[in-house]
Amino acid sequence: MTLRRLYVHGAGRRGDAAWPHVTGAREVDFVSFPNASSIAAQVEKLIALCGGERMLIFAHSIGAVPVVLAADRLDIAGLVLVEPALYDLARGEEAIERHIAIVTEARSQADNGDLVAFWAILRPLMFGGPFEPATWDDERPLAEHWASTNLPWGHGVRAGMLRGIPTLVATGGWNAEYERIAARLASDGATHVVLEGFAHRPQDSPSFGAAVADFKRDLAVSDR
């Protein structure tokens, strides 16, 4: 059996830049959501784009949120989630609650018009290192992006939404939040692989393609 493949980006890179293991493949679609699109709008776009066709779907980070929310209206043969930001699945976990609390505090500063205060809180959490006034002019566009991007929680993602869908979860082994989310998915039947050395982008690991190939063999599918 052959499958069309759909790739859903996270909050950063898009297209083939986000998925370096995809080379010269046919029957591949890269989703690109408008920057200001809501999660609900992304769900509807996925449903329209897939059109009822059976698919192998890849999603990175926050891109996993609309995929999971749309799953019951898609025909998914297999799902590959890369560091999925499915925070609602792991509410109550210390690492998850800490992250949500910090981001909530930072976003409240941005909502009050203080982008510098927002960045002083968010930058160490997301990128490491303190806020530096000397680099503010260069980093301001990045701060503006993160002050307005969708948050990956509060969208109604619940345990069991992927039950019955063969799922591979790849994490980088660097962050407790993503490991806890992956553990919750694994407890619901997903296969979890850890590809270290590439932080939030384990799809950049030379081992990622082999992990996907093993997963696809279990699905008894092939590329065109």
Image (cartoon, grey):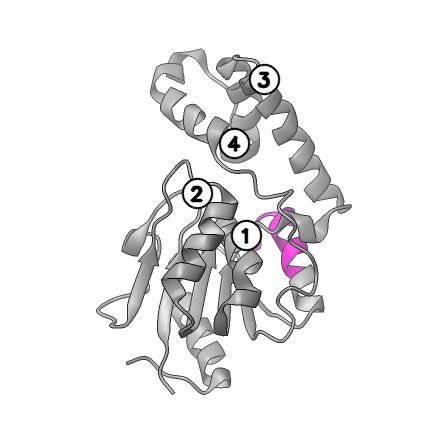
Please name whichever residue, 109 or 175, is drawn nearer the observer in this view of the structure.
Answer: 109
Disc 2 crowd rating (10 Å Cα; few below 14, some 14-19, many 20+) is some
Amino acid type of the residue tagged 3 in the rendering:
Gln
Q: Nearer the viewer, mark 4 or mark 3?
A: 3
Q: Going by the picture, which residue comes out furthest to the right?
A: 92
Q: In the image, what residue occupies the spot 75% across and 47% down?
A: 93
In three-dimensional space, the C-alpha distance between marks 2 and 4, rounded to whole angstroms, equals: 17 Å
Which amino acid type corresponds to the residue marked 2 in the rendered image?
Ala
Residue under the point 40% across and 60% down: 48
Q: Mark 1 or 3, which is nearer the eye? A: 1
Three-letter amino acid code at the position of disc 1: Val
Q: State left or right for residue 99 relative to residue 196.
A: right
Q: CA distance from mark 1 to mark 4?
A: 25 Å
Disc ID at residue 109: 3
Disc 2: which residue = 11
Q: In this orientation, which residue lies closer to the viewer: 41 or 181? A: 41
Q: Nearer the viewer, mark 2 or mark 1?
A: 1
Residue identifier under label 4: 128
Q: Are marks 2 and 1 in contact (CB under 8 Å)?
A: no
Q: CA separation, marks 1 and 3?
A: 25 Å
The reply to whether the magenta stretch includes residue 178 is: yes
Q: Mark 3 to mark 2: distance in Å?
A: 21 Å
Q: Which residue is labeled 1 in the image?
A: 65
Give the spatial CA distance, label 4 vs label 3. Answer: 19 Å
Task: Name the amino acid, label 4.
Answer: Gly
Q: Percent x, y for residue 55?
A: 42, 73
Mark 1 or mark 4, which has the lower sequence index?
Answer: 1
